[in-house]
Image (cartoon, rainbow, N blue to C red):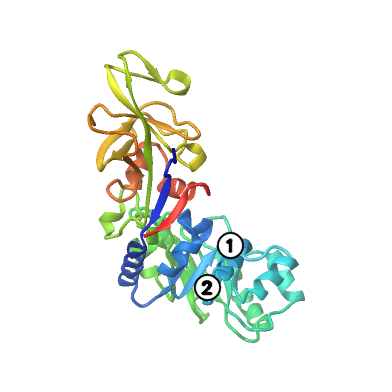
Amino acid sequence: MSRHTIARIHQGALQHNLRRVRELAPDSAVVAVVKADAYGHGTAIVRSGLADADLLAVATVGELQDLRAHGWTGRLLLLEGFSGVEEYQQVLAAGAEFVVHHESQLALLRQRPQTDALPIWLKIDTGMNRLGFQAQELATLTAEIRQLNQGRTPVLMSHFACADDPENPMTSRQLRCFQDARADISGAVSLANSAAVISAPASHGDYIRPGIMLYGISPMLGEQGSDRDLLPVMTLSCRLLAVNQAKAGASIGYGARYHCAQDMRVGVAGIGYGDGYPRSMPDGTPVLVNGRRASLAGRVSMDMITLDLSDHPDAQVGDEVVLWGDGLPVEEVARGAGLIPWELVCGVTGRVRRELV
């Protein structure tokens, strides 16, 4: 029997979310982030739904090349920049823009200056202490990149650490750091990730870089997409492979973690950690069976999960089971498992068929 394990990707929801992003930042160009296979949604599938974005952004050269291979002819940005001469040549061959965030990249540019004057994005660290030059270096670096790139001023960028929490003062500190560093420097700027698009309008600038919110997931702590008029793009589903009877006191699954409190119907559904549904999911994690709630009962296996169907007397083999998406927010599922929704959608593996709706 086929497991029918499918991630349905709703193009209309994706387009709605992009429009919502533009409503929140009407004066900014949109850099739609599609790294990690479009957050697990499938880059080749979402590309058409993001056709109205101003740029697409990825993390690796391989992702960049895949987008070109799948027909994206618009602007592309490599967020982590190149590593070494070979990647630099591949980026140029793809006609992509790139971020410079480290001295090693700058050293290569000095040896091999740009010849086509595509925009270079210059990243400074304003307090996240991850990637980027020191803020006090910005004026010197901007002048040097102008010289290396036929007089073209780089796009100045940074990244926020705590924009998902509007009460955290760090976003304001990072914004002040950036503004002080570029006080006498003209040129385009890019600061806002998904969370800052919502929580920090002062950071919007010339380019915003939404990622997770495009896929209908709220970047804000304690929220779900519907709180921000976002629609879920992925609905992950499978089918019931079996419906069995278990006696009171019987254990279910590996490790005999779950014990039946009473005689109960147990459903076996065709999804597991081999598909990206985490083994760490606890008993009681919600699913939808034929649109109604049921819950996980027993440890997740590689290919299967077991469900408490006590309240589903009519459930039968072949019925649909929704793990998250339309009708069951992925944010709720993630919170119950001590995860973040990014981990769930990005973790959906390649053996799950993506299907454009």
Q: Secondary structure at mark 2?
A: loop
Circles 1 and 2 in contact, beta carbons < 8 Å:
no
Residue behind mark 2: 72
- Residue 34 visible? The answer is no
Q: Is residue 51 visible?
A: yes
Residue 30 located left or right of residue 274? left
User: In front: 17, or 138?
Assistant: 17
Pick the quarter of the image with the C terminus: bottom left
Point out residue 50 in the picture as x, y percentages from the top left corner.
42, 69
Q: What x and y, as percent, mark residue 202?
A: 36, 69
Camera-side residue: 280 or 322? Answer: 322
Q: 217 or 203: nearer the eye? A: 217
As drawn, 291 above or below 228: above
Q: Residue reaching furthest top?
A: 249
Residue farthest to the front?
A: 1
Name the spot of residue 138 as percent of width and height, x first: 58, 72
Q: Is residue 291 above or below residue 137?
A: above
Q: Which residue is mark 1?
A: 63
Pointer 2: residues within 10 angstroms few (<14), some, or many (20+)? Answer: some
Q: Residue at horizontal 74%, vertical 70%?
A: 108
Question: Which quarter of the figure has residue 213?
Answer: bottom left
In space, the residues marked 1 and 2 are separated at their CA atoms by 12 Å
Image point (58%, 62%), residue name:
63
The mark found on residue 95 in the picture is none
